[in-house]
């Protein structure tokens, strides 16, 4: 299985980007993982929230192959413990999914078209985090999940 993380907008913080890169590199030992950045929209001052969500949604949907399984990182999604999340990934791998795509939306969330295409929603927390921090948390949790599945000492129970 391949795992892809799609995110809207660049990470401006170099230290945060270094940490993201570290976990992306670590993940390469377990799974084919890619982090793809969809550039921020231009001239958003002239767009309503719904127009911005629609335009970002179009960009997200263009990045998907017909066989991709789309999972949104959404505040209303299912919350997992790290062990439960590793089991969730294992079930997805066992199901023969070719590519599992996690998406971090823009500042206003996702368009209705993206929600309609999604086959799941995951919430990292009830708290709100910056989109840049969420990237790090997601990549680290995917890495942690693989270390749990391999009974490696990274995660302490």
Image: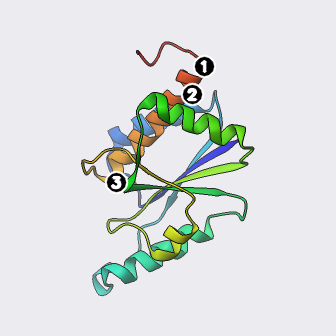
Numbered badge on residue 150: 1
The relative height of residue 41 versus residue 156 in the rendered view (above or below) is below
Between 91 and 31, the one nearer to me in the picture: 91
Question: Could you tell me how far apart the alpha carbons at marks 1 and 2 are, in whole angstroms?
Answer: 6 Å
Q: Residue at x 54, y 22 (%)?
A: 147
Report if residue 47 is visible in the image.
Answer: yes
Residue at image mark 2: 146
The relative height of residue 150 versus residue 95 in the rendered view (above or below) is above
Residue 42 place in picture, x, y as percent: 39, 77
The relative height of residue 29 versus residue 6 in the rendered view (above or below) is above
Between 139 and 12, the one nearer to me in the picture: 139
Circle 3 residues within 10 Å: few <14, some 14–19, many ≥20: some
Q: For residue 75, which quarter of the picture?
A: bottom left
Q: Are marks 1 and 2 in contact (CB under 8 Å)?
A: yes
Outermost residue toward the top?
153
Q: Residue at x 33, y 38 (%)?
A: 15
Q: Residue at x 67, y 57 (%)?
A: 68
Residue at image mark 3: 131
Question: Could you tell me how far apart the alpha carbons at marks 3 and 2 are, in whole angstroms?
Answer: 23 Å
Q: Residue at x 57, y 28 (%)?
A: 146
Say which quadrant the N terminus sits in.
Answer: top right
Question: Could you tell me how far apart the alpha carbons at marks 1 and 3 are, in whole angstroms?
Answer: 29 Å
Indicate which label's residue lies in the foreground, 3 or 2.
2
Say which quadrant the C terminus sits in.
Answer: top left
The relative height of residue 70 versus residue 25 in the rendered view (above or below) is below
Residue 7 place in picture, x, y as percent: 46, 57
- In the structure shown, which secondary structural element does the residue marked by tag 3 occupy? helix
In-image side of 101 versus 12 (left or right):
right
- Say which label, 3 or 2, has the lower sequence index: 3
Outermost residue toward the left?
127
In-image side of 27 versus 110 (left or right):
right
Residue 106 place in picture, x, y as percent: 38, 65
């Amino acid at each position: 299985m391949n795992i892809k993380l799609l995110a809207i907008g660049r990470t401006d913080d170099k230290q945060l980007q270094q940490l993201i890169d570290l976990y992306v590199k670590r993940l390469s030992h377990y799974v084919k993982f890619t982090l793809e950045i969809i550039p921020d929209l231009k001239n958003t001052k002239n767009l309503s929230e719904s127009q911005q969500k629609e335009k970002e949604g179009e960009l997200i949907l263009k990045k998907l192959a017909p066989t991709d399984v789309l999972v949104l990182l959404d505040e209303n999604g299912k919350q997992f413990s790290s062990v439960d999340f590793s089991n969730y990934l294992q079930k997805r791998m066992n199901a023969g999914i070719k590519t599992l795509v996690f998406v971090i939306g823009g500042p206003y969330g996702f368009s209705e078209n993206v929600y309609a295409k999604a086959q799941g929603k995951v919430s990292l927390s009830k708290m709100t985090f910056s989109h840049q921090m969420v990237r790090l948390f997601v990549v680290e949790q995917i890495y942690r999940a693989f270390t749990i599945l391999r009974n490696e000492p990274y995660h302490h129970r």
